[in-house]
């Protein structure tokens, strides 16, 4: 099951009407990386989370705050 961060990446990409390839091009990452983020197989770093938010027309901190929460949850157990 994808994490909340993974699900949010997919949700904002779709709400921005971007394909995974479009988002990848805007952020400067590979399309397969976008799919890996959305499935939860990989987690974007802090800077990339901000770039994804901006590329989708959202405030930069939209995914950054979720990134911190996912990191805290990982360490909290």
Image (spheres, rainbow, N blue to C red):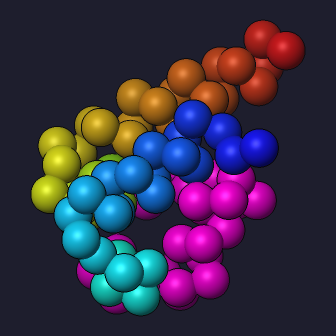
Query: In the image, which residues are magenta?
Result: 25-48
- Residue depicted at x 68% and y 59%: 39
Q: In this view, does 3 lie to the left or right of 48?
A: right
Q: Position of residue 41 (x, y in %)?
A: 76, 59
> Residue 55 or 18: which is nearer the viewer?
18
**How many callouts does the rendering have?**
0
Q: Is residue 5 left or right of residue 40?
A: left
Question: Against 61, is 72 above or below?
Answer: above
Q: In this view, does 16 lie to the left or right of 35?
A: left
| Helix, strand or loop for the magenta stretch, by majority | helix
- Seen as rendered, the residue at the extreme top is 76
Q: Where is residue 53 in the image (x, y as percent from the top left)?
A: 28, 53
- Seen as rendered, the residue at the extreme right is 77
Q: Can see residue 54?
A: yes
Res 34 quadrant in image: bottom right
Q: Can see residue 24?
A: no
- Residue depicted at x 69% and y 46%: 2
Q: In this view, does 47 lie to the left or right of 31?
A: left
Question: Against 42, is 33 above or below?
Answer: below
> Residue 50 or 36: which is nearer the viewer?
36
- Residue depicted at x 76% and y 25%: 74
Q: Where is residue 70 in the image (x, y as percent from the top left)?
A: 62, 29
Res 18 quadrant in image: bottom left
């Amino acid at each position: 099951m994808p994490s909340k961060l993974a699900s949010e990446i997919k949700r904002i990409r779709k709400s921005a009407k971007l394909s995974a390839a479009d988002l990848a091009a805007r952020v400067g990452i590979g399309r397969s990386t976008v799919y890996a983020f959305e499935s939860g197989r990989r987690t974007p770093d802090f800077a990339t989370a901000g770039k994804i938010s901006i590329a989708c027309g959202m405030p930069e901190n939209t995914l950054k705050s979720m990134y911190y929460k996912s990191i805290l949850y990982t360490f909290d157990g």
